[in-house]
Image (tube, coloured by chain):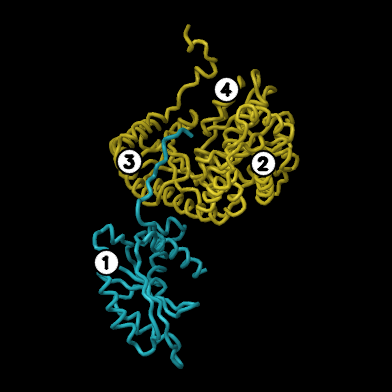
Amino acid sequence: MEMKKFKEIAEVLEKESRTTPASIAAMLNIGEDETAESIREMESEGIIRGYSAVVDREKAGYGGVSALIEVKVTPQRGEGFDRVAQRIYSYPQVRGCYLMSGGFDLAVLVEGSDMKEVALFVAEKLAVQDSVLSTSTHFVLRKYKDMGFVFGEKHQDDREGIIL
Amino acid sequence: MSIREHIKPAVRDMPPSGIRKYFDLLNEMKDAISLGIGEPDFVTPWNIREAGIYSLEKGHTHYTSNAGIYALRTEISRYVHRKYGLHYTPDMEILVTVGGSEAIDLALRSYAGPGDEVIIPQPCFVAYPACTAFTGARPVIVSLKSDNSFKLTPDLLESALTPSTRVLILQYPNNPTGGIMERHDLEGIVEILRKREDILIISDEIYAELTYGGKKHVSIASFEGMKERTLLVSGFSKAFAMTGWRLGYACGNQDLIGSMFKIHQYGIMSAPTTAQYAAITALREGDPDVAAMVEEYDRRRRIMVDGFRKAGLPCFEPEGAFYVFPSVRETGLTSEAFCDQLLTEEKVLAVPGTAFGDCGEGFIRATYANSMDNIVEAMKRIQAFAERKRNSKQ
């Protein structure tokens, strides 16, 4: 029951994190206090990790560059990939870090102000780590969709007036 | 010679819709929010659009058979069986049409004419009285009541029956009220209709998928003995957000479908081919998309109902379609004055209830087929507006 409620509230917030507890309560037909309490609980339990805006940085004029870096590593005894992953994702330049199946181990999303900055980060911080066997850097040329939001032309409501 | 005086009176004398003026006003306004348009704001789900595009790539650019692609009729047969346990054979009992509205027009033209009466419960979709009048038959209006959630009751039906009654048009979930009829609501109606086997029921179930609160749509055709006498009309516009594709269908008795087929084959030839290919995919793969849209509509519905109630405009719980039909009597304004002033003062468009029949006086129709942001903003404006009007009344 609790989990079902958490899931429903979380789904609303995932779509639109600005939705107020009062609106969520109305949408899901539950009490306002109960909704606010559930959100607090999810925050304190770390189910909700944070709230942020999805920004089209290129449009905002501070594009910078981002890159997806494939990293091959040697897992460590007793700690697997966790320790090396932590050593990588702790850098603030790293926006995302995932353990992957397939031809490499970690996918690391890095952002920087220009290509040189990212390249230096890879050369000086990533590639030099003991457990890192190899890296392969792919720069993002264009973002079409991010976090579920389509970038580029905003969809306009072009429905015409019709009698029905 | 004046063309005008020779135009058939039934067509010439049909008044233009009163909603037109609002759309003209709306076009000149910036930042206006329209809660007036009766169609989904969602774009057709991508896999359905993609199927349409693929059919073009494959060169499916010709007419289809008059009744519609056989594979589509088969999918419709399966779908209706899956939803309501009804069985219609794709060969004789299903016709693919240009929207559900073509099917309604064809059925009325096949079944009703001068001297006949067609019972139309109101408030209702604007096309029923007009299409009835075009056939020369007489629309018999039954005024539904808000304290009854705008359901058709046995008493109301009985009072409208005469020996000339030929057709009953039922539309649940309802446009504009959002009302539905559950199994126990339909039972009393069916009871009466069983005594009048000459009456055809045109059941417009275009909004069936949009039924909320854990309830399931019930088709009157699923009552014993009623399938033969009911024309089940539905389509892809509302459930699959496919209004612009213009595709609907009718399921019913083979003699009726056969008659409708004749008018359809000479007037229309066949429904749009691309739309038919897309619709096959919609029925085969569309369930998750429909479920996601229904969930989103349901959330918006609650926000809007809550918003109207907080604005002091009472509304019964609409359990279907995507409309809310609150009463605006508290403000001391007529439906039309309320909508006029709401649009000019707050830039929010709602449609006066009177557009859907005289008994819609005192109500307005607002649709939640709009983004959550727009709905939240519109409700804020409506609350301020209603407050102001109530104060100035005192």
Task: Return the mark for residue B133.
Answer: 4
Secondary structure under badge 1?
A: loop
Query: Which one is in front in this view, the residue at disc 1 or the one at disc 3?
Result: 1
Residue A79: image quadrant is bottom left
In the image, which disc is placed on residue B277?
none
Question: From mark 4 to mark 2, how far is it between C-alphas?
Answer: 25 Å
Percent position (x, y) of residue B161? 66, 27
Q: Say if labels 1 and 2 share a chain.
A: no
Q: CA distance from mark 2 to mark 3?
A: 40 Å
Q: Which chain is yellow?
A: B
The amino acid type found where label 1 is placed reads Gly
* Residue B393 visible in image: no
Residue A127, how many percent across, how many down? 34, 84
Q: Which residue is mark 1?
A: A64
The residue that appears at 44% across and 51% down in the rendered structure is B300
Q: Amino acid at mark 4?
A: Ala
Q: Taking B361 as reference, is B27 left or right?
A: left
Question: Mark 3 = which residue?
Answer: B32
Name the chain under label 1. A
Q: Which circle's residue, 2 or 3, is located before the other in the chain?
A: 3
Kindly state the secondary structure of the residue where label 3 is placed.
loop
Callout 2 and callout 3 share a chain: yes
Q: Residues within 10 Å of mark 4 (few under 14, many from 20)?
A: many
Q: Are marks 4 and 1 on the same chain?
A: no
Q: Determine crowd level at label 1: few under 14, some 14-19, many 20+ residues with C-alpha closer than 10 A.
A: some
Of badges 4 and 2, nearer the viewer stands: 4
- Regarding residue B87, the answer to whether it shows in the image is yes
| Residue A130 coordinates in the image, percent (x, y) | 36, 90
Circle nearer the N terminus (4, 2): 4
Which label belongs to residue B220? Answer: 2
> In the displayed structure, does residue B327 sit left or right of residue A65?
right
